[in-house]
Each structure stands twice: as C-alpha cells, then as structure tokens.
Amino acid sequence: MFWLSGGFVFRRVVSPFHKLDPRVKLLLSLELFFLALVSSTVAEEGALIAVVLVVATVARSLRRIGRTVLFSSLFAAFIFAINLVFGLGLQSAILYSVRFLAIIGSTSVFFVTASPDELEQIMKWMRLPRDVVFAFVTAVRFIPVVMLDAFQIMDAQKSRGLEFEKGNIFARIRNMVPILIPLVVNSVIRSGELAEAMESRAYGSTPRPTSLYGMRTRWYDVVVAAASLVVFVTVTLYIYHLAPL
Amino acid sequence: MTALSGVSLTIGERETVAIVGENGAGKTTLVRHINGLLKPTKGSVLVDGVDTRKTTTATLARKVGIAFQNPDHQLFSDSVENEVKFAMTNLGFAPEVVAQRVDWALKFFGLEDYRSSSPLVLSGGEKKRLTLACILAWDPEVVVLDEPTVGQDALQKEKLAQIFRLLQSTGKTIVIVSHDVEFLWPIQPRLVVMSGGRVVAEGQISSVMQDRGLLDRARVIQPQLLRLHSELRDRPPAPFLDVSEARAWVEGRDSRQERR
C-alpha cells in the first residue's frame, strides 16, 4: 500500500527541487498536469511521464515517485479494460490509461517535494479561508500517521487469523471491513482530540495570526518559473496548432 | 535500517519471559517475529520447530496469540461477543466450541454485561481486557502481550497480574513486553533486556535487576522495593527510633540534630 501512496507523502531530502519556492513547484506540477490533460497521443503522454521521471530524479525521489507510477498501472489497466469494454477503441484505451499515469506522476511531483508547511503557505497566499487551509493541511500532515495506523491494524487482524488474500473478490472486499472500521473510528477520535487540543492552544482567538515562516522567491525560482512557462506555452501551442490531429 | 541485530533467544515451553528496554530498543519488533508478522532478513525464527518464513501469520496464529498495545487497532465488530468470536471463526473452530469459549472468555474477563454492547464504547481498561479475552478465547499455546498495563489503573493491574499467574499455572508460554517493572516483579519472569536492537542481558528478574550499571545503560529503572533494599543495604546500620527518623536517615538527614 505504501508503494502506491508513498508518491503523495512529503519526503524531506536535500535537492535542488526541494529548495524551490513552493509556488514554483506548484506551477511546474500544474503545467505537467495540464499538459497531461491536453496531450492527444500516447507518444506525448509517454514523453510527459519521462519528464516527470526526470524531475523526480532532480528531486532525488525517483524511486518513490516511480514506484507510485508503476503501481498505479494496476488502476491504469482497469481504465484500459473499461474503455475497451465500452467500445472506445484500442488507441483511446491506451491513451486514457497512459494519461492517468501522467496525471499521477505530475501531482506526485508536488506532494513529494512540498512539505505540509509549504502547502499551508501556498494556500494562505491564495487567500483561502484559514479553517479550510488548516483542515486541508492537517489532512495531508496526517496521511503518514493514518498509513501507520492502517499497517498496525492489518498486523493486529492478521494475528487473529485473518487472511486478506483469501477468497474471491467479494470475500477480499469483505476482509477489508476489520481494517476500515478501526481506521475510520481512530481517525474520527483523533480529529476530535486534535480539535480540542487546538482550541486549548488558542486556535481561532485572533482573525489574523502571524506566521513563523514565509515564502521567499530567489533568482533561481524566477529562472525556473520563466523557463517552465516558456516550455509550457510552446508545447501547448504545438499540441493545439502544429501537431497533426 | 537494521531494527534487530545479533539477537539469539530461546523461549522454552511454559516459560514466562518479559522483554524490557528503552523506547526504540526493538522489543515490539522482536515479538512481531514470533507470529510471522515480520520475517527475519537474516537468521531464522522457529516456533515449535516451524520456520516462520515458511508459513503464514494466519497459520501461526493458532499457536501464537498477540495482544497489541493499542486495543483501538483491532476492535471493529458490532458487539463484544462477535469481537471475541472473530479469530475463532477465522481459525475454523466449530460453532459450539466458539460459543463455549466466548462464554468462558467474557466471564473470565468480567465482560459478560457488555456481551451485546459495541466494543467501541467500552472504557480504555475494558477494551484492553477485551483484547486479552479475544486472544485467550482460542487458547493459543504462546501468549504475547505488548505493554499490557498501559492505560490500566492499579486495580486493573492487580487483576492482570492475577490473570498472568493463572496463565502460568495453566502451562502457557507467556511473553510480555513492558516498561512496567513494578508489574513484572511479582510475576518473576525471565527477563530479557534489550537496547539498540540487541539483547544485552537475560536471566531471572531477581538477578538482572541487581545490575544497576546494565539497567542504567538500558534505561530501565529498578522496582521500588529493590531500590529501597539496595539503599538500606549500602548504608551503615543505624538505630531507628521511629518512622520519621528512619525516613530522615534514608534521605541523609539527622532528625535528632534537626530537633535540637
């Protein structure tokens, strides 16, 4: 499970990509995401995945992002099968499944390299309501905790003789109930406790709280953002006007 | 990262073993090898002669019951009764045996009144007892308990100690992971002291607990009774008149001088 979700969990490493202004990281991720949506051939989507993997290498997170993309192939295969079943044709089926992988890779690049603090700064910079920002960032911050919970619950149920891989697809889904119920209950309890702890520590007492950290745009942020915008506009123009339809 | 290294440990049949050590010493990691939740990357773990790498956790569960530290990580059923039944149905027990064992477990752990209640509404201590009931209901040969006293009040701890003594008398092999040396002392288990993923000492609790240097290194505190005993033993004899004078003597004060 971690191999699949690991690509959406922040990893603290020292890399040139991690040092970028979080807004630039978001810009790059959005550009890749948009290009994944508008690309119309399998070759373009494949090239995009290659770019994602290059960015992941620069961010020293190739293994993590690569594994997530690789394991997402299971879902991509499902998308492929569904498209085939509904008669969209082989080429479209391949295109949609590869596009799915490109979308996963492009979003993964942002979540692996942007810390929850940076995510919070971006959302504040977008002037989103404070409660929304807090709820979203807390949810992201708790992903590793919930994952750890899930592993421990799985261990506890396996110790009681539960075999997840036993039986047909329906039995396997039913086998997930002993994991999901404790996981959801624990998460609800934790959220209640967190809310009480936050209120006890004066959350919401002032409408404009100060921030310990701020975002700083340096010269290399401007260079990377400008270069990526040039490439993005060029590629978009190529796809819409120059590429054979 | 290596969690355990150079660990060589034999736990005999019907033996009670307690594993102690600082946080992160590898205690929980070690006991997770006993039912095959974790498989060793080097070396082997044998349970009743069976290599845990060559079998599944579900198979080993028949012999080894583990009660985890946090009861919220396993309780999910709509009733206490079904929670206790869960493992036995997984292990393929006959319905009449399941009913019999559930009755016994609920009665034994004082949970009969909660039979049809949701396990999620029980108090912390009751949940802990329920997890133990869930394990003991299927009568495993080896019982592993990870921090059984966490969140238990003094009365519950006393009850747990009674349960352990009963389990010892029924011939179970018991492995306890605990920081609570006060709880372990009356049970008198064989003690395994861990530090940094290694077993640094093992032996009867009464002898291991005498080694202050070892305990300091492993960040384990002696039981109060033993500390008091060492304190009194290491001081020259003194004539006591009353309790306050004895206390003053232990604390290094001279109460008679103070009185003057």
Image (cartoon, rainbow, N blue to C red):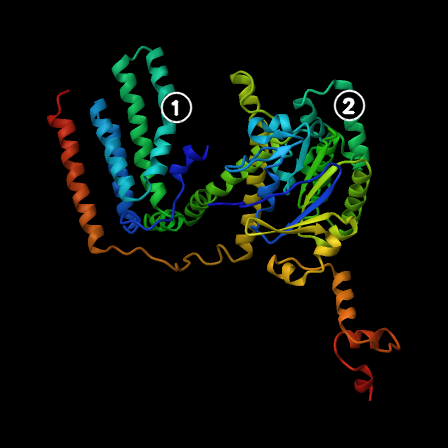
Residue A161 in view here = no
Residue A118 vs B117, above or below: the answer is below
Instruction: Name the foreground residue: A125 vs B253.
Output: B253
Residue B44 quadrant: top right
Q: Residue at x 81, y 30 (%)?
A: B104
Q: x, y (%) of residue A131?
A: 44, 47
Q: Residue at x 27, y 36 (%)?
A: A52
Q: Name the residue under label 1.
A: A74
Q: What element carries label 1?
A: helix
Task: Point out the residue furthest to the bottom here.
Answer: B260
* Mark 1 chain: A
**Alpha-carbon distance for marks 1 and 2?**
42 Å
Type of amino acid under label 2: Ala
Type of amino acid under label 1: Leu
Q: Mark 2 points at which residue?
A: B99
Residue A147 vs A134, above or below: the answer is above
Horizontal relation, residue B200 to residue B160: left or right: left
Task: Point out the residue furthest to the left here.
Answer: A242
Residue A233 in view here = yes
Crowding at label 2, few (<14), some or many (≥20) Cα neighbours within 10 Å?
some
Crowding at label 1, few (<14), some or many (≥20) Cα neighbours within 10 Å?
few
* Mark 2 chain: B
Horizontal relation, residue A125 to residue B114: left or right: left
Residue A63 quadrant: top left
Residue B18 vs A213, above or below: the answer is above
Task: Point out the residue furthest to the right here.
Answer: B241
Q: x, y (%) of residue A212?
A: 39, 60
Horizontal relation, residue B125 to residue A204: left or right: right
Residue A117 vs B101, above or below: the answer is below
Q: Quadrant of the C terminus of chain A?
A: top left
